[in-house]
Image: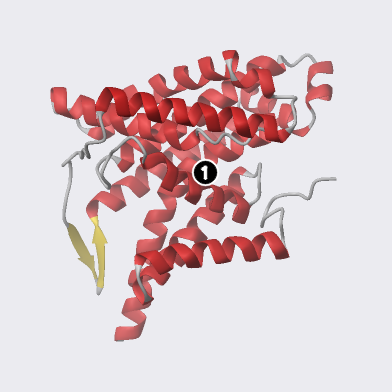
């Protein structure tokens, strides 16, 4: 394999491994928008909470972060369901700006509480390190593990949405809440379930992030920006679109970082985001609002 080809393969592999994690996070964000037409600006803080669950369990018991998913997923599901029932549900039918302001305020409250409880100290979970070579391509073991688990969880969420009774109820609510209600679907429960699942996916992403990056109270903001970029690329409300958008974003980010610096790579991502908004504002698989 030539040097240029090997470099290109390395960039693509690194980008795809990163994209799997972005897909897990963005899938929950696009699910909430699809079912409730609410953009949850506190979604990144749910990732942060999932990361802290993994950190605290590892510090207290040495629990493997992958096993910690059995704790973080149900905990964040309950947190999300309760939040939707008593907070977010109040703005479901309100103008979009109202939900944006509410969830932004919620994100500030969660971040401030985390800072008060856990301070601003950086934490990490030294779970797995190193890598291996596949031909001339180097593959990081932590990123490969996070990618594999992310794909399994994203696939499980997709199967739930397309094959189960409540998954179909959520999709019907997303398509037309009034018709779904007329057909006997409990749309309030469908919305609560959707927000709970979205929160669980964010918590799972945070648990996986805990052994890839440093954990601190404000970490959710950076990942939230990436999740927004993914759903704009893939299409708001489109779960498959989120997966495709995440892979594109991961490869573009890895390529830009290789060719320049991390800071310039961030700029390239948002230039691509602006271009998509100008050319196809509803994303690759989204549908235009009428």
Circle 1 residues within 10 Å: few <14, some 14–19, many ≥20: many
Residue at 14% across / 28% down in the picture? 62
Residue 32 on image: x %, y %: 61, 32
Say left or right for 91 vs 108.
Answer: right
- Kindly state the secondary structure of the residue where label 1 is placed: helix
Figure check: 288 above or below 94: below
Residue 90 on image: x %, y %: 67, 18
Total count of labels: 1
The quarter of the rendered structure image containing the N terminus is bottom left
Q: Is residue 73 visible?
A: yes
Residue 65 on image: x %, y %: 25, 34
Say left or right for 147 vs 271.
Answer: left
The picture quadrant where one finds residue 76 is top left
Say left or right for 264 vs 227.
Answer: left
Residue 222 on image: x %, y %: 42, 47
Residue at 35% across / 30% down in the picture? 50
Residue that carries the numbered disc 1 in the rendered image:
26
Residue at 64% across / 22% down in the picture? 191
* Render colour scheme: secondary structure
Residue at 29% across / 30% down in the picture? 52
The quarter of the rendered structure image containing the C terminus is top right
């Amino acid at each position: 394999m030539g040097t240029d080809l090997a470099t290109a393969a390395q960039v693509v592999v690194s980008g795809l491994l990163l994209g799997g994690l972005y897909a897990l996070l963005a899938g929950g964000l696009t699910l909430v928008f699809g079912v409730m037409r609410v953009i949850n600006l506190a979604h990144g803080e749910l990732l942060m909470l999932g990361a802290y669950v993994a950190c605290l369990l590892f510090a207290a018991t040495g629990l493997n972060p992958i096993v910690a998913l059995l704790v973080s997923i149900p905990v964040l599901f309950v947190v999300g369901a309760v939040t939707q029932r008593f907070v977010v549900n109040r703005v479901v039918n309100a103008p979009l700006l109202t939900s944006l302001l509410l969830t932004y305020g919620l994100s500030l409250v969660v971040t401030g509480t985390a800072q008060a409880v856990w301070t601003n100290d950086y934490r990490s979970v030294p779970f797995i390190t190193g890598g291996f070579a596949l031909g001339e391509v180097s593959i990081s073991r932590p990123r490969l593990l996070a990618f594999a688990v992310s794909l399994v969880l994203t696939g499980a969420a997709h199967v739930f949405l397309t094959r189960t009774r409540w998954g179909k109820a959520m999709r019907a609510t997303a398509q037309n809440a009034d018709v779904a209600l007329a057909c006997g679907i409990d749309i309030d429960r469908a919305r609560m379930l959707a927000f709970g699942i979205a929160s669980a996916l964010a918590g799972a992403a945070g648990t996986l992030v805990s052994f890839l990056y440093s954990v601190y109270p404000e970490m959710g903001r950076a990942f939230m920006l990436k999740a927004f970029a993914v759903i704009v690329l893939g299409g708001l409300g489109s779960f498959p679109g989120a997966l495709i958008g995440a892979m594109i974003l991961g490869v573009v980010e890895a390529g830009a970082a290789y060719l320049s610096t991390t800071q310039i790579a961030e700029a390239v991502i948002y230039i691509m985001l602006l271009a998509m908004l100008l050319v196809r504002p509803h994303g690759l698989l989204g549908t235009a609002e009428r």
